Amino acid sequence: AVWDYTAGWFMDQTGLDNSVLTRPLDQKGAKYTIVNHCRWDGLGDIVPSLLFKKSFRNYVLAHFEANDTAAIPVLYRLA
């Protein structure tokens, strides 16, 4: 799976130290095949890597495209 190749990039390049990959028990009719829940403490921990590191485009996005995969980030702030 593409996540096997790209998860390490996020850990190495953004300092991600928590990540939980989940998938529906029944794949039939599931809206998403997997959900990766992870947390950064602030946008400053992730945004610069996504914008300025060429390896994000050349490695992560290239793997996503080759595997017909897309990330759908959901950003939220704890109350």
Image: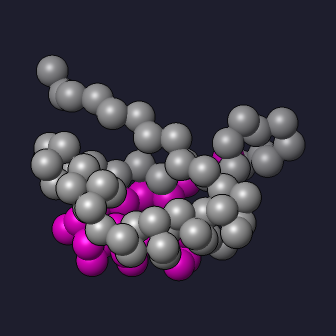
Evaluate whether residue 46 shows in this view.
Answer: no
Considering only vertical position in the picture, is 6 above or below 32? Answer: below
> Toward the viewer: 75 or 28?
75
Evaluate whether residue 18 shows in this view.
Answer: yes
> Toward the viewer: 76 or 68?
68
What residue do we see at 66% from left, 72% from top? 1
Q: Which region shows up in magenta?
A: 3-24
Considering only vertical position in the picture, is 35 above or below 14? Answer: above
Q: Position of residue 24 (x, y in %)?
A: 67, 46
Relative placement, left or right, of 24 versus 43 is right
> Toward the viewer: 8 or 62?
62
Quadrant of residue 68 in the image? bottom right
Q: Position of residue 44 (x, y in %)?
A: 13, 49
Q: Position of residue 61 (x, y in %)?
A: 53, 63
What residue do we see at 66% from left, 62% from top? 65
What residue do we see at 21% from left, 56% from top? 48
Considering only vertical position in the picture, is 12 above or below 28? Answer: below
User: Residue furthest toward the top?
Assistant: 79
Q: How many marks?
A: 0
Relative placement, left or right, of 7 versus 17 is right
What residue do we see at 19% from left, 28% from top? 78
Q: Position of residue 33 (x, y in %)?
A: 69, 50
Relative placement, left or right, of 57 versus 17 is right
Colour approach in the figure: one colour
